[in-house]
Image (cartoon, helix red, strand yellow):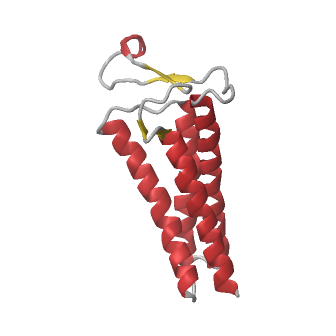
Amino acid sequence: MIDTPNGRLAQRLALAIPALLLGGAYASEYVFGLFPCEMCWWQRWPHFAALGLALVSIGVPPHRIWVALAALAIVASGLIGGFHAGVEYGWWEGVTDCAVTTAAEGVSALDAIMNAPLVRCDKSPWDLFGISLAGWNFLISTAAGCTILGLLAKGRA
């Protein structure tokens, strides 16, 4: 168990941030129909890892190390989001084969491929205040990850 208030807050944030961001990603996909491109998936993987690491931190010592690793995974997702946002804004070129199709259940594979929308990495399907979802992930994840690391450092002093 983490024994300082800052450490406990860091652990809670390490659990909450990836859970909330993944929940938002899945809500945008399944509720609002904003299907993820390949680079969107790249941003989700570190959040899955962060969530797992934060869960491990609850019961497996050294608790601070697990929380710190979760924070680094959150920052990694943010950095991937920053790269993806740069691709969407046209600041630099992304990977060349970055497009995925979404498949529907209950239909043949060929029909699913032929009728599925093409999701491109260089086009933002939605933004808020001119910031794409990848841009928001960059802002939230890097700030949250650095905050968690800062809380852990304060807790050691």
Q: How many marks?
A: 0
Classify 30 as above or below 54. Answer: above
Q: Quadrant of residue 141?
A: bottom right
Classify 90 as above or below 27. Answer: above
**Residue occupying the point 51% across, 77% down:** 9
**Left or right: residue 114 compared with residue 13:** left
Residue 1 in sight here:
no
**x then y, percent, for residue 65:** 67, 73
**Left or right: residue 152 compared with residue 56:** right
Name the quadrant of the N terminus. Answer: bottom right
Name the quadrant of the C terminus. Answer: bottom right
**x then y, percent, for residue 106:** 29, 23
Residue 145 in sight here:
yes
Classify 130 as above or below 56. Answer: above
**Residue occupying the point 45% across, 52% down:** 21
Classify 104 as above or below 155. Answer: above
**Residue occupying the point 39% across, 18% down:** 116
**Residue occupying the point 44% across, 58% down:** 19
In depth, the one of 2 and 149 nearer the eye is 149
**x then y, percent, for residue 16:** 45, 64
Q: Quadrant of residue 115?
A: top left
**x then y, percent, for residue 13:** 50, 69
